[in-house]
Amino acid sequence: MKGGKSKTETRSSKLSVNKKPAKGGKAAAAAKDPNKPKKPASAFFVFMEDFRQTYKKEHPNNKSVAAVGKAGGEKWKSLSDSEKAPYAEKAEKRKVEYEKNMKAYNKKLEEGPKEDEESGSEVNDEDDEGSDEEEDD
C-alpha cells in the first residue's frame, strides 16, 4: 500500500458514521422518559393474548415461545375478517385510550418540566445541606 487509507479503514469509518445516529436516536428517546405511555397492541397482539391462554390449556407441557407464536400466526391467518373484528375493536379502544393518555402526557410535559426542575433542585439543596452538617460534625 502506498500511503493513504486502506479500503477497510475507509469502510469502517463510513459504517461507524452511519450507525451512530440510528442507535443514539432510538436509545436516547426510549431512555429519556419512562413515564411515557406505551403504544397500544395491534389486533393481532390482542388476539395473541387470548390465544396464549387457550394454547397453554391445550398444550400444558409446551414451553416453547416460538411454537406458541407460530401456532398463533397460523390461526390468525386462517381467521376471517368477521372473526378478527372483535380483536380489531379491542385494539381500536386501546388506541383511543393511548391517544387520550398521550394528550395528557404531552400536556404534563409542557407544564411539568418547570415544576420538576424546581422540585429537583429542592431535593438537591436538601442533600447539600445534609452533607454540610456531616462535614461540620
Image (spheres, rainbow, N blue to C red):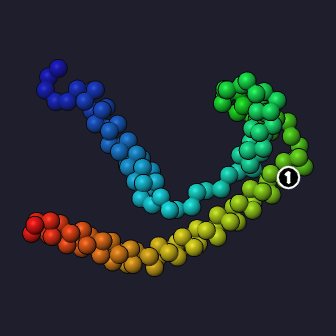
Residue drawn at 23 percent across, 26 percent down: 6
Q: Is residue 8 left or right of residue 49?
A: left
Residue drawn at 73 percent across, 44 percent down: 49
Q: Is residue 5 left or right of residue 45?
A: left
State the count of labels. Answer: 1
* Quarter residue 91 falls in: bottom right
* Quarter residue 4 falls in: top left
Residue drawn at 35 percent across, 75 percent down: 119
> Which of the pair 114/16 is nearer the observer?
114
Seen from this angle, which residue lies furthest front?
Answer: 137
The residue type indicated by label 1 comes to Ala
The image shows residue 68 at horizontal and vertical percentages of 72, 31
Give the vertical position of 91 relative to 101 (above or below): above
* Quarter residue 37 falls in: bottom right
Count neighbours of disc 1 (C-alpha within 10 A) and say few if under 14, some if 14 to 19, many if 20 or more. few
Residue drawn at 70 percent across, 33 percent down: 69
Give the quarter of the figure containing the C terminus: bottom left
Q: Is residue 48 left or right of residue 14?
A: right
Residue that label 1 marks: 85
SS at mark 1? helix
The image shows residue 41 at horizontal and vertical percentages of 68, 52
